[in-house]
Amino acid sequence: MNEFDLIEKYFAPLSRDGLKDDAATLSVPGGHELVVSSDTLNAGTHFLENAAPADIAHKALRSNLSDLAAMAAQPLAYQLNLAFPEKPSEKFLKDFTGALAEDQKEFGIFCSGGDTTSINGSLSISITVMGVIPGGKAPKRGGAKEDDVVILTGPVGDAFIGLQILRGKIETGDDDYFIEKYYRPRPRLDMIEHLRKHAHAAIDISDGLVADLTHICKQSNLAAEIRITDTLFSPQAQKLLHKGTVTQEELLTGGDDYELVLAVPAAARVPGHTIGVFRPGPPQVAAFDVAGTPMAFSHKGWTHF
Amino acid sequence: MNEFDLIEKYFAPLSRDGLKDDAATLSVPGGHELVVSSDTLNAGTHFLENAAPADIAHKALRSNLSDLAAMAAQPLAYQLNLAFPEKPSEKFLKDFTGALAEDQKEFGIFCSGGDTTSINGSLSISITVMGVIPGGKAPKRGGAKEDDVVILTGPVGDAFIGLQILRGKIETGDDDYFIEKYYRPRPRLDMIEHLRKHAHAAIDISDGLVADLTHICKQSNLAAEIRITDTLFSPQAQKLLHKGTVTQEELLTGGDDYELVLAVPAAARVPGHTIGVFRPGPPQVAAFDVAGTPMAFSHKGWTHF
């Protein structure tokens, strides 16, 4: 089976038009803007070399969908670029595209095209996701206002723990839970309507809560004061914190979580934990523990270089 | 300089909004469709490991723009995903983004976002290009009609010769000319209006003339009969053909050219060489030499696996 046959058998069914042309044509509804984002995931950096094909597919597509969620955009289509170190097995392609098909159904998106290539190196997956939003409704990182509260939509740190388990560094009583959080994050597309109504700024916390909240601070030129309590962590993570298996700093800066952090007016009713407030001041995050003591971080989040 | 500083210094200037958000928002004019295409270029496969950063940038962006040209779409924006084996030097980034900036100006496009990552392997560049076209105006591979003529917009095979020179396999008196054709192809965006008016089908010949014309045949369920004459090749390539340095088959199947092949009504006035005609018959390309003798090809074009 050559490259074109593999595309016909495994990738064309993910599309609407059979991937027949040099490019796809897509309609954007009148009065809407197109929202576009890209994420590349490389074996050994973003997922383990021995990761299951379905896990890789879920993580790749969902981490991209998370960027649409942060922009309050409805998913439309995605481009899938795959660079393979060697000809992929049919088993790999079946599992990989099967997982994409599941996610397409769940999140309402389809594959509009892409490219499959051979690479001198490890598997690399680059996805560009496109969504739509009524014009002017997208929250921006630079939109936070003084006295806005900081909302976190869900627990932070679970994916970091999942990665440590996969690397064989720790064991927990909840390994499956944490690994699922690492490989199969849930993009918070359920928050879209809340964001469109209330959010002045939003970002997903894939680089770590502190690093990503710092992005909002910098673009909005405001300080964020946040209070770190156990309720920011899942009950499963809290158990490990209490045992000393992981630290709060690791969970707050580890990255790979796909919850959102938002700036919304204090009076807005938005699901999630209110963890702080935006104030005038140097554009950075000031974190305090339960006792009100400032917390210091040796690093803020993930960086490639 | 860390990852975020590098993005700020070298990539943000390629954008309109400073790449501040999780995603870009783009406007698509009313009555227009969005046209989307992706191409991945990997070191050692799509360009030589020792290629100059500017050459890599030109080839990557222009090969993507060529897909827009084949769809008769006006360039709008592109996503740039870069996976680096090691932290890139500032010299590399300066040359690379400088070449992109030149092409942005020339072809009327800007960078709407992307991702920079570290990879266990060679440099990999994945671009997703977006353009716009009045609704319903994009030529499709499946649109060729019986008695349409086959138009080739420019010479075929020059890029193949360029690659052979770069690999040290041949020498010519026109090395610079051929290498430029390999690394700095000119996407035929100047053909957009002709395509919108006349083309029933179009494709770029990046995989080789015969392979790509075969795609039109298959999608349109027609045979294409083409006549191979010296006028299909550049004067520089003709010299090498006459000396026996290269063969017609190599030039016709080598790939990496970014001319277009079109199906248009015989009466249409479209610039380019009329090289054949679409007929009812098995969906494949039948090539004949000047004497009318059928030509056979041992392979039709480039495939990754």
Image (spheres, coloured by chain):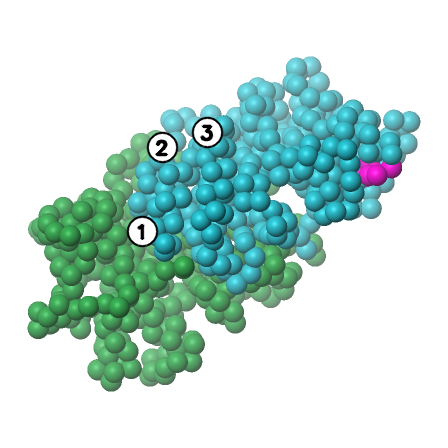
Chain colours: A cyan, B green
Instruction: Using a 10 Å C-alpha cutoff, classify the residue at mark 3 as few (fewer than 14 neighbours), some (14 to 19) or many (20 or more).
Output: few
Q: Is residue B289 left or right of residue A201?
A: left
Q: Position of residue B219 (x, y in %)?
A: 23, 46
Q: What residue would you read off at disc 2?
A: A27
The local crowd at label 1, few if under 14, some if 14 to 19, many if 20 or more residues have their Cα within 10 Å, is many
Q: Is residue B43 shown left or right of residue A152?
A: left
The subunit carrying tag 2 is A
Question: At numbered mark 3, what does the secondary structure look like: helix, strand or loop?
Answer: helix
* 1 vs 3, front mark: 3
Q: Mark 3 or mark 2: name the one nearer the start of the chain.
A: 2
The answer as to whether the residues below labels 3 and 2 share one chain is yes
For the residues marked 1 and 2, what is the alpha-carbon distance in whole angstroms? 19 Å
Image depth: mark 3 or mark 2 in front: 3
| Image height of A82 relative to A162, above or below | below
Distance between the Cα atoms at labels 3 and 2?
A: 19 Å
Residue annotated with mark 1: B69
Task: Locate residue A89, reporting x and y percent.
Answer: 47, 52
- Residue at 12% x, 56% y is B277
Magenta-colored span? A244-249
Q: Residues within 10 Å of mark 2 (few under 14, many from 20)?
A: some
Q: Are marks 1 and 2 in contact (CB under 8 Å)?
A: no
Q: Are marks 1 and 2 on the same chain?
A: no
Which quarter of the rendered picture does the N terminus of chain B lie within?
bottom right
**Which residue position holds label 3?**
A105
Which amino acid type is shown beneath numbered disc 3? Answer: Lys
